[in-house]
Image: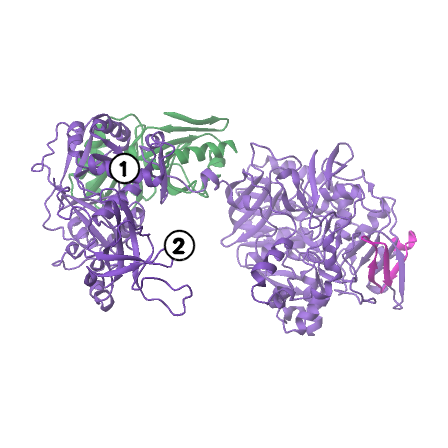
Chain colours: A green, B purple
Amino acid sequence: MKEIFSISGIDIFQRDFNQIMIRGNEHEKLNQIINKGVSLNLPNENLKIVNNDNILIAKHSFDQWNLIYFNDQNYRDVLKLVSNLNSNNQVLASDYSYGQVYFDISGEKKNYYLNKLTHFDLRLKKFPVNTMAQTLIARIDCSIYHLKEKYIITCNKSFEDYFTQRLADSINL
Amino acid sequence: MTALNNNKNSCVTDSNKVSFIFDGKKYFGFDGDTVASALLRNNIKIVGRSFKYHRPRGIYTCGIEEPNALVQILSEKDEPNTRATVKRIYSGIKIRSQNRWPSLENDFGYINNLLSPLFSAGFYYKTFMGPKGFWKNIYEPLIRKSAGLGKPPKEFRSKSIHNHHNVDIVIVGAGLNGLLATSKFIDTDYDVLVLEQDNILGGSLNSSQKIKTIDNLDARVWIKKTEDLIKKSKNIKILKNTLATSYNQINHIIALEDNSVGKPLASHKPELILHKIRTKHTILSNGHIERLISFRNNDLPGIMLAGSFEKYIFRYGVIPEAEPIIFTNNSSTFSLLKSLIDLGCKPKAYVDVRDESSIEKKTKTILETNKIPFYFSSEIEGCDGNKKLETISIRNKEKQIEKISGTMLCISGGINPDVHLFTQSKGLIKWDEKYLTFKPETAFQNTITIGSANGNFNFKRIIEEINEKLSLFNIKELKIDLESDCPEDLNITELWETNNEKKSFWSKSFIDIQNDVTTKDLHQAVSEGFDRIEHLKRFTTNSMGTDQGKISSINSLGIVSKILKKNISEVGTTIYRPPYAPLSFSAIAGRSTYEFYDPTRKTSIHSWHVKNRAIFEDVGQWKRPWYFKKNDKETMYEAVQRESKELRNAAGILDGSTLGKIEIKGNDALEFVNLIYTNAFTKMKPMTARYALMLGEDGMIKDDGIVCKISDQHFIATTTTGGAAKVLSDMEEYAQTEWPHLNVHLNSITEQFSTFNISGPKSRAIMRKVFSDVDFSNDKFPFMTFKNVNYLDTQVRILRASFTGELGYEVYIAPKYGLELWEKFFRYGENLGLIPYGTETMHLLRAEKGYIVVGQDTDGTVTPLDLNLNWMIGKNKKDFIGKRSLSRSDTSRKGRKQLVGILAVDKSKIIEEGQHVVKSSSIPSKIKSPIKYLGHITSSYHSPTLNYYVAMAMIEGGNDLIGKKFYVTQNRSLENISVEIVKPVFLDPENKRLLS
């Protein structure tokens, strides 16, 4: 975990999470595999999140889910789940762990700072807890997950330097 | 003229003195002063020169509508065209007047005024036609030199930022109506954003004493109390110093906040904040704008709008003149008259165009009681003076001219609702015969207009209007009493221009003071046929200045309607375009400048590249090493030659992480790739790879890459760096919309792998050292096969393929381990001559082998057949994207441009990319008839291995021209280079190196 910024009202940390991108049509079959692997059910509704202390699963679109491990996970276990999922020909699971970067943003001013970088409507009534969105932040494609009192933002790793600089810049100005 | 300070009932007091510099001279104002109020306080009358005629100009208004008083702020990086009526002073601010040389008092450009008969309407469109050659050498440089007002600012790094808001309601303007509307939303469930251009709330309540009490409280006490209540309400946010500039579709509003009001630019804070606001409802309570009256020399310094004069008194605490003359056609000037009397000042005369019976009793009583000369049914004929107002000619009710001396004339030609934002939102406006102005009529979006912005000039109706218009929100009713001793409603008589008595070159009756457009110009434009208001606007440049004619555009409609003998409603109005007031480019750009100009993408090896002197090129948003400098002296040409040679002799490694990668899986994955690519994949064995082409539906090459087959249900495809996103989205679109019956899923895995390409005769030896457990022999690891290999706690995919025509391998690894593995290659490979190479070297190596680069050798009009890539088309495939188009008459005809190799007959010659292939040995110095060209050079490089230039070209019927001789043009010579058309493979045509 790396602190990007921490001042009154906003804390931004870069986290080392693992992630799997899952695509598949047969929800029930897929759900069984996932449930067996991580003891969580896949969310049914688009852009909804289910999570526990260790794992988050979000439904990105009609056939796409995203599984994020919050805690340090043995990378081989991640690859093992990917392999298990891929043993079903109708499912595609890709390991996204190191191709993405993860930011944990909390504090009462988090919306104010993020709205320097995104037009996205972060108001609680429009973006409730346990929902997610894919939107532009600092002009790059990001996923933003609303958990209780914080956001998890992920983007492609290649943007890491640019994005962290933009985050710091928006706090400084 | 002597200005007085007003400490009574003013928002600016004389408690804090502030020094400032104007045109090199030091003056003092007070904290809270604008540049204009401070200059008026110092009795400075001329503040600039006019745009076209360089006439001396003073301060005409007290706000954003100012046409004249534009200044350059030297202490803020020379920011030009700043409105003196808005810009606040601070200690040490340096200001310079504009559009004059050598000085404001003695301006050489004033000669334009003497030559003004030459500069009538349409001058620009009628002159500068000849003689030939004058435009480029004389007219354009001269016009460029004399154009504009201020000088462009010096280069500086802006810190302006953008801020986004999503709210339920935006209230534009926090004057009386805005505050009343806002107060209704206190502690409700609505998210409300209030935009106020001033740094204090209250609007006209601070600028006049029209409203005596609100809810039995003094107006300023009520403002304070209301503001406190609003601040406590969690659902309402107020942005002060923030001007709404654009009202776009879907209730999207742009507002500009000046974050450095009354203070120098801070080095660590944004000077401007551009607010981008998305709202459900917009309440426009942005008030009104007073308009001028045209008469002879109505631009002289000393002439000011009456409402602005009053605003200076109460908002800024300066009485510009104790004995002004007032000229009006409406009842709004009563307030100024009364305020002056209350302050112990006495207007020198009161000139009203209305007949005596139409003038309010209150006005007449004050005039009589205070023995102020009163001219009813009269008008100002014109004004005279040397660089400032000295004499005023009044045409009295007997039509006689009376001259009185005076240094300040306050005029009011009526009041316009500020409909700019409303019309920007596509709302419709309608002419109001009672108030002689356009009023909002039909909103196009969720827009509500209230108060004077809605054309409601009756104080008694304010509360009723707000309750009625905001009733849709189901919030509390307002019950507030307003007390005013001003006339209840606006009483106005039509007057756009007075009759001129005197005619001279010097005398002019202006309609657009900023653009120096006169009423005579309007007459001329109409007589020349420009009788449509939009045409007339462009022909005369009326209302086209930075003020958009805020105080005069309606007057011009009035005058034109008289000329055309039509009603104003028939003449129509021009469209107010965003922005409402000029926006600085730095505000528009926000942080998207310099290092944040465009998002940048870096590979996991980027830091190593930087340390090793890589020079980067931008490919899409990626930073890719272009070449590596061995030392500071090495040129790009030298570096690329060195890298190419060393790779062909030993080995080179390229960071190919930027290549797009797509994972394709599903029961129908095989059918899917067969449809997407031209190649046949059915008979392909698992764990093998194939160079593949993707076409558009028009049969043209769209992208290329390598497709790895894990099984019939699982593939991994690579794409070009620039094409990655488009290829994925196209695949996804086909999967979802054209072939939804196929069971196939796609994931982008571009970012999930760092990719290296190791090439050269020593590459196998290096791979053996790095991956000691893998058998890299030809038998066990043949060309276009791949293996998955365990590495640390992950897996590496190794593919035997080649970008360069050499023995080569591609390695795919999770980016976490990318740098570690890259460095390992160098630990094991350096002794074997391994070098890093960049994209330019890769292009050279590819050209030597005749390997195309999509986007360089192709341009969206090239089919695989044009490139002789027929072998890549699955002949027995039932279908693939673009298949049908390959047999169209145009794509299958003879004589299409085809890819060939080009070699100079004299091999010391340099062939340049982009040059034409022609039949003639030279180009005539004067081309009289078109020269037939066969095609163009797509790639050309000096091959260090062959020691001459190798080039590829797309030329008509190229395949049939092999062995023929033609010519290639040169950039700096009319002599063409003699070349031979050859097959586009220059090195190792038998692929011995590749398969070694």
Range of magenta residues: B365-394
Label 2 chain ID: B
Nearer the observer, A81 or B608: B608
Which of the 4 image quadrants contains residue B714? top left
Nearer the observer, B780 or A139: B780
Question: Which numbered disc, 2 or 1, marks the residue that appears first in the sequence?
Answer: 1
- For residue B167, above or below residue B933: above
Left or right side of B132 for B593: left
Q: Looking at the image, which residue is at 81% across and 46% down?
A: B320
Residue B135 percent location from the top left of the image? 58, 62
Q: Which residue is mark 1?
A: B643
Left or right side of A106 for B946: left
Q: Amino acid at mark 1?
A: Glu
Q: Which residue is mark 2?
A: B972
Left or right side of B702 for B364: right
Tell me if residue B860 can be seen.
Answer: no
Magenta stretch: includes residue B387: yes
Residue A154 percent location from the top left of the image? 36, 36
Residue B220 percent location from the top left of the image? 73, 40
- Residue B652's tag is none
Nearer the observer, B874 or A69: B874
Identify the secondary structure beneath mark 2. Answer: loop
Identify the secondary structure beneath mark 1. Answer: helix
